[in-house]
Amino acid sequence: MTSEPVDPDLASRRLAHEALEQDDPTGWFERLYSAASEGAAVLPWDRGAAHPLLLDWVATAEPHGAGQRALVVGAGTGWDAELVADQGYDTTAFDISPSAVETAERNHPDSKATYQVADLLNPPAEWHRAFDLVVEIYTVQALPIPLQPEATAHVADFVRPGGTLVVIAAARDDNTPDSSVDGPPWPLTRAAIHAFTTPDLKLIQLERTPSPNDPTLHRWRAEYLRD
Ligand SMILES: C[S@@+](CC[C@H](N)C(=O)[O-])C[C@H]1O[C@@H](n2cnc3c(N)ncnc32)[C@H](O)[C@@H]1O
């Protein structure tokens, strides 16, 4: 019997579909990270570096994080959290998967960031309006569409008055119906990007750029500011 390499996207989608069938929409992340840490799977989203759109935001905005707190949502293997911590922020990075947290800590043994397990759908109460910078990359879109409004509201709630939220997500045309999206991921419509706003959390910049790997796919980078 010969074994053939498995497409990492297909492998993760299979795990996701099994979890969704068991009404456990987030259970597959731990299974995937755990398999990846044993070399038995590949994380399709692991870039081995910070997201280029976050790198570009840092280069342009030149944030000064000294004395400020940052939160990185669904931090995965930690590359974005490291970039944020390198800007001087007191950085907390969380993920629902304990194996993701272990992998991030292993990847970054000298990290200034604090990695912890937490659930975006049930976050610690003390994170309410507690962070000067919140970074969300590809977590909301990894959740089934019915869960996205709740996840979006929690992300927005982490931002303290005067604070900034940066969201990077795959883009979906507004006229593509939810029912035709076979996630994960479930990319975000323009309306879903606007859903991070509240009366005091305003969208101040929105860009839609083609993916370098596939120019037919687009990504959002959105920046919000809380009054
Ligand atoms: C598509 S991956 C993106 C990871 C990372 N942000 C990146 O861009 O490389 C989605 C991440 O969100 C995490 N995640 C999914 N649901 C979550 C939840 N409810 N709370 C916290 N993390 C979650 C997953 O474990 C995974 O690391």
Image: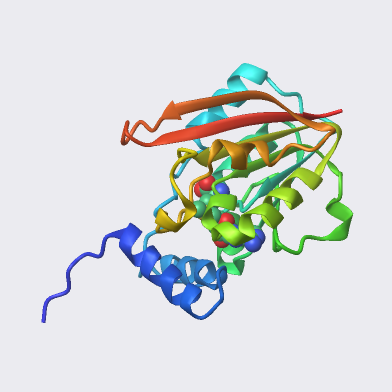
Residue 117, x across and y down, in percent:
69, 64
Residue 176, x across and y down, in percent:
43, 45
Q: Quadrant of the N terminus?
A: bottom left
Q: Residue at x 54, y 61 (%)?
A: 144
Quarter of the rendering containing residue 201? top right
Q: Nearer the viewer, residue 13 or 89?
A: 13
Q: Is residue 59 above or below residue 83?
A: above
| Quadrant hosting ligand 1 | bottom right
Residue 152, x across and y down, in percent:
68, 49
Q: Residue at x 56, y 36 (%)?
A: 190
Q: Residue at x 25, y 65 (%)?
A: 6
Q: Is 185 situated left or right of 225 in this image?
A: left
Q: Residue at x 54, y 70 (%)?
A: 30
Residue 14 visible in this rendered orientation of the protein:
yes
Q: Nearer the viewer, residue 119 or 46?
A: 119
Quarter of the rendering containing residue 97? bottom right
Q: Is 160 situated left or right of 192 in this image?
A: right
The color scheme shown is rainbow
Residue 54, x across and y down, in percent:
57, 32
